[in-house]
Image: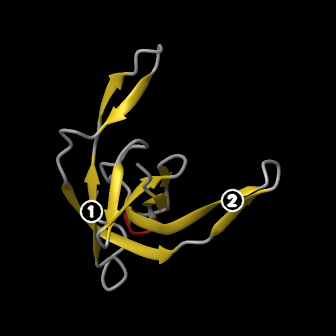
Amino acid sequence: MAAVISGIVARHAVVRERPQMVDNGRGGVEADFTDATPVDLPGWALDAGNTVADLQNRDGAAIRWTARGPFDADVERHDRITVFGERCKIDGAVVRQPGPSPRTSHTILSLVSWEG
């Protein structure tokens, strides 16, 4: 499937780094970016983010960017995404938004600032 958001809107590229998931010694796994290779992913529309309030825990998450790109973009939840030189992580799931045609189908990422 081709890039779905075309023309002047999807003129940005993001950079994806995929970690190796390693045993953390406590029965789980954690992301290790030591040998992660940056990969350019073209065809993204970027919108400034917003703050999502969590009323139960009395805090909020500052979404830096909302990125919309190709439906078949090779991105996964644990990937690190760089936008305009700023490292971000995907907040929540990678969302695949199907539409009635390839032009209206896309991947949505909510990106927050990377810490660590």
Q: Residue 60 has which mark?
A: 2
Give residue 39's position: percent from left, percent from top. 19, 54
Q: Residue furthest front?
A: 116
Structural crowding at the residue carrying mark 2, measured as other residues with C-alpha within 10 Å and reported as few (<14), some (14–19) or many (≥20): few
Structural crowding at the residue carrying mark 1, measured as other residues with C-alpha within 10 Å and reported as few (<14), some (14–19) or many (≥20): few
The relative height of residue 77 versus residue 23 in the rendered view (above or below) is below
Residue 41, by quadrant, is bottom left
Q: Amino acid at mark 1?
A: Ala
Please tell me which residue is depicted at 52% across the width and 52% down the height of the picture: 91
Residue 83, by quadrant, is bottom left
Question: Which secondary structure lies at badge 1?
Answer: loop
Total marks placed = 2
Give residue 79's position: percent from left, percent from top. 35, 46
Q: Which residue is mark 1?
A: 2
The relative height of residue 49 versus residue 114 in the rendered view (above or below) is below
Front-most of residues 2 and 9: 9
109 left or right of 42 in image: right
Q: Residue furthest bottom?
A: 8
43 left or right of 55 in image: left
Of mark 2 and mark 1, the one earlier in the sequence is: 1
Q: Quadrant of the N terminus?
A: bottom left
109 left or right of 75 in image: right
Please tell me which residue is depicted at 78% across the width and 48% down the height of the picture: 57
Q: Amino acid at mark 2?
A: Gly
The relative height of residue 108 versus residue 45 in the rendered view (above or below) is above
Question: Which secondary structure lies at badge 2?
Answer: strand
